[in-house]
Image: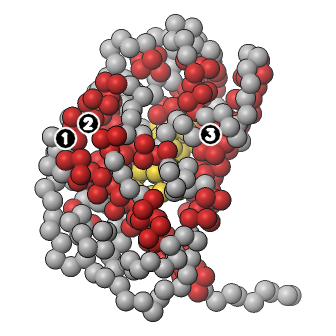
Amino acid sequence: TLGADTSDDEESGGGDVAVRGATRSGGTLGADTSDEESEDDEGAVQDPPQPALTDATDPQAGQDGEQVMGVSVEYLVSDFLDDCEKFCKDNGLGFDPSTTTFREFSELLWGDPSRPRDFLGHATKTDRRDGKQWTSLLGALQQDRDACVGKADYFLSWTWHYPIAQVCASLKHFCIKRGLELSETFVWMCFWCNNQRVWQCGAGVPNGTDIFRTNLCKVGKMLVLLNEYKDAVYFSRLWCVYEVFVASQLPHEIEVDMVFPSDVEERMFRESLNTLDDCFQVDVMNAKAGRPEDEKDIKEKIKTSPKGDDGVNHTVHRLFYEFILKEGENRRKKQRQPVKPRDLR
């Protein structure tokens, strides 16, 4: 159980999400447990560091001395949905942001790579990196609406299987929780930032695991987005599990934060810790990737790593569980703060 195994203590490179001295009782997260005894992770045995992956020099990855760019949250929660609706209406396509997933939208755009549909003009605009026609969605957006693109503040770990509206609303919820300006918060998202001409057409496809590490290290912060805590799609996707595991194992600290949809979060914090412990079980070798070559490459890296698949499962499980403990404690602290009398003047 999590309360007994302390092999992945925060000194082993897990960033600032590990929580020391957090209560591991079966109580409800929303309840005030300030008088309960806590366990300390004293005397933890550190695992060997994860071997560094080779840096890549791909046209879509941040080169040395070059910033990794992202899309603004403000654009995602406002104009993006309008742009999607207009695009689908102009092309005679059905679109409901509450149910249409990014995966389904990608099929509308790139289902036939030889004839991509020209959302935001990306299929006809020139990529500034290689001079060829068909740039990334981010590149197209930057050419027309430069303020919507900026240096990435977060690398988003997520899956295209989420509904579009849910992703946008969750990012807005995260910014409000953390006191971030929507217009000044930029997120690296593979859907936006990778040039799908390179990935979809299959010619000279770069090594995704190497590019991931390059971009993550340059951004320095990861935001994990889950659609649910019960039967979360996130844990069934290999890239998601691998991303958060690598972020926790890099020799230099990567700050990892997490967000759930606001309604899901409220339900989650009424659950018991034992229930949430069960929800965050991970089986990385049964997770799937969209591209078979990615799945083979990632699983081979996991099997040959010092931790192996069991170590990856435990590390990711613990990371999520301890984040929930930390967030639960923050909520309890806010609940205990005295309410200031309203100024009636």
Of residues 242 and 142, which is closer to you in this image?
A: 242
Seen at 41% across and 65% down, the residue is 277
Quarter of the N terminus within the rendering = bottom left
Of residues 47 and 345, which is closer to you in this image?
A: 47
Query: Which callout, 1 or 3, points to the residue nearer the camera?
Result: 1
Relative to 201, residue 345 above or below: below
- Is the C-beta separation of discs 2 and 1 under 8 Å? yes
Badge 3 amino acid: Pro
Seen at 39% across and 67% down, the residue is 322
Would you name the residue on which mark 2 appears?
299
Relative to 30, residue 131 above or below: above
Any part of residue 129 in sight: no
Relative to 1, residue 249 above or below: above
Badge 2 amino acid: Lys
Quarter of the C terminus within the rendering = bottom right
Seen at 23% across and 53% down, the residue is 311
> What secondary structure is found at the residue carrying circle 3?
loop
> What secondary structure is found at the residue carrying circle 2?
helix
Badge 1 amino acid: Lys
